[in-house]
Image: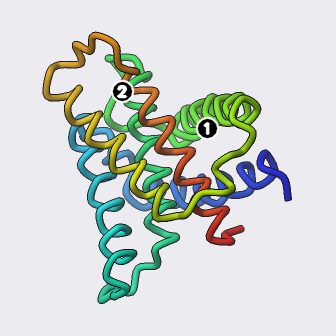
Amino acid sequence: MNTPEHYDLLLARCRTLFLAKTHDYGTAWRILRLPSVTDQIFIKANRIRTIQETGVQLVADDVNEEFVAIINYCLIALMQLHLPQDTPLDMAPDAVAQAYDHEAAENRRLLLAKNHDYGEAWRQMRVSSITDLILMKLHRVKQLEDIGGAALVSESVEGSYRDMLNYAVFALILRGEK
């Protein structure tokens, strides 16, 4: 399966889970400020790294599900960044689906452009290295959040969320997830 097909398949799975949770919990995620979303992604990535390093997992939640959570939290962050300030906390399910689909499509475009330029080098990487890249991006985002986003030469917080989302997709592909 090629990368665009794999991306579409994985994002459809993530979308299904996200919209099911929206059905169950509404848009409770809207209350989260971006640093809180960043911290949630950190918790997931740090758990993955701990399991990778120790080889021990005491909680049954699958590592692949943690990568799925990273994808959905990155999409939450991107939606929060782009939703108008006056968007109500409680959003209609169709509005959530539309916002989710928009951000996922933007990320797909970025993934395809970078894959073209980098020649899908990620396929030669280890999943542990991808986990480290996600954690590095998280530390960068936390630093940018702590300085109020006033970066001199760095990529934006948005770009970091988009990269982390794509790294999580790559990890799932490398782990054989469909």
- Compared with 124, 156 (above or below) is above
Where does the N terminus fall, quadrant-wise? bottom right
Q: Please give the residue where the numbered disc 2 appears in the rendered image.
A: 157
Q: Residues within 10 Å of mark 1 (few under 14, many from 20)?
A: many
Task: Name the residue rendered at 27%, 60% in the picture.
Answer: 43
Instruction: Choose between 123 and 17: the one closer to the eye.
Output: 123
Task: Name the residue rendered at 35%, 19% in the picture.
Answer: 154
Helix, strand or loop at mark 1: helix
On the rendered structure, is 154 left or right of 124?
left
Query: In x, y percent, where is residue 111?
Result: 66, 36
Which residue occupies the extreme right position in the image? Answer: 1
* Type of amino acid at the residue the image marks with label 2: Val
Task: Name the residue rendered at 74%, 56% in the picture.
Answer: 9
Instruction: Choose between 57 and 26: the one closer to the eye.
Output: 57
| Residue 137: quarter of image | top left
Which residue occupies the extreme left position in the image? Answer: 146
Instruction: Choose between 123 and 43: the one closer to the eye.
Output: 123
Where does the C terminus fall, quadrant-wise? bottom right
* Type of amino acid at the residue the image marks with label 1: Ala
Residue 104's disc is: 1
Query: In x, y percent, where is residue 144?
Result: 23, 26
Q: Which of marks 1 and 2 is nearer the N terminus?
A: 1
Task: Name the residue rendered at 57%, 32% in the picture.
Answer: 103
- Compared with 41, 147 (above or below) is above
On the rendered structure, is 126 left or right of 26?
right
